[in-house]
Image: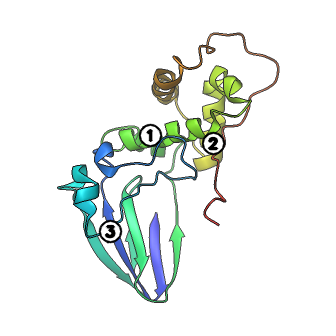
Amino acid sequence: NFIIVLEGKKKVRMFPPSPLQSRYPNPLGSKGKTIQSPIDLDDPNILKKFPKFVGSDILDVNVEAGEMLFIPAFFWHQVTSVEKTLSLNIFFGDAGDNAYLEKIMKPPIWEAFKYWVLNIMEQNAKMPSFPQILRNLPEVLSKFFLKQWHEKPSEQQLSQLIAAIKKKYVTNYNILEEKKTSEGVPKLKIRGLKWRG
């Protein structure tokens, strides 16, 4: 992700994706496309409210007109317009069938990426199609990543993701070994994209 400021100024503070729990991610199933956190870096009582946040490596940068800043995948960031600002974001991928997945499925990004996937699973958990999603995980995940990032997960990547999902859901939904139906492969959807208004 690149933030490009065309006019004005933005203050950007970002920090690495791990350790995940010191970032206080919102509970699984929270709305939206990204993992959010209740941490407000401008709050003077931040360490009283979020004591595990102590020692976080924060990069504090001003991005002015004509400048751009690269934000690595799954880095936590808080962006504030310091004045009236016109900016744009550019998201891009890597060449290859699953090069981006290959990068984010390794430490230190894996834990944050896994939480993101589990958050989307939990967004879908109350939907009638969820048992079918669980029964068809290889196909569901393949279609999901193809749509999201134009990536085709490898068998190893699918196995790693399915193991993380099974660890969370097998005890709650003992249906993974049940026979698949002819209903077709349901879509895994990011839910709550319009909730911010």
Cα separation, mark 2 vs mark 3, equals 31 Å
**Which badge, 2 or 1, is on the more N-terminal residue?**
1
Between residues 123 and 48, which one lies in front from this camera angle? 48
Give the image location of residue 31, x and y in percent: 58, 50
Between residues 142 and 14, which one lies in front from this camera angle? 14
Q: Residue at x 41, y 38 (%)?
A: 105
- Secondary-structure class at tag 1: helix
Amino acid carrying label 1: it is Tyr
Give the image location of residue 1, x and y in percent: 46, 63
> Compared with residue 193, is residue 108 higher up or lower down, i.e. above or below?
above
Give the image location of residue 152, x and y in percent: 58, 37
Residue furthest toward the left?
55
Would you name the residue on which mark 1 appears? Answer: 115
For mark 3, does the 10 Å Cα neighbourhood hold few (<14), some (14 to 19), or many (20 or more) residues? some
Q: Quadrant of the C terminus?
A: bottom right
**Which badge, 2 or 3, is on the more N-terminal residue?**
3
Would you name the residue on which mark 2 appears? Answer: 146
Amino acid carrying label 3: it is Arg
Would you name the residue on which mark 3 appears? Answer: 13
Give the image location of residue 142, x and y in percent: 62, 34
- Secondary-structure class at tag 3: strand
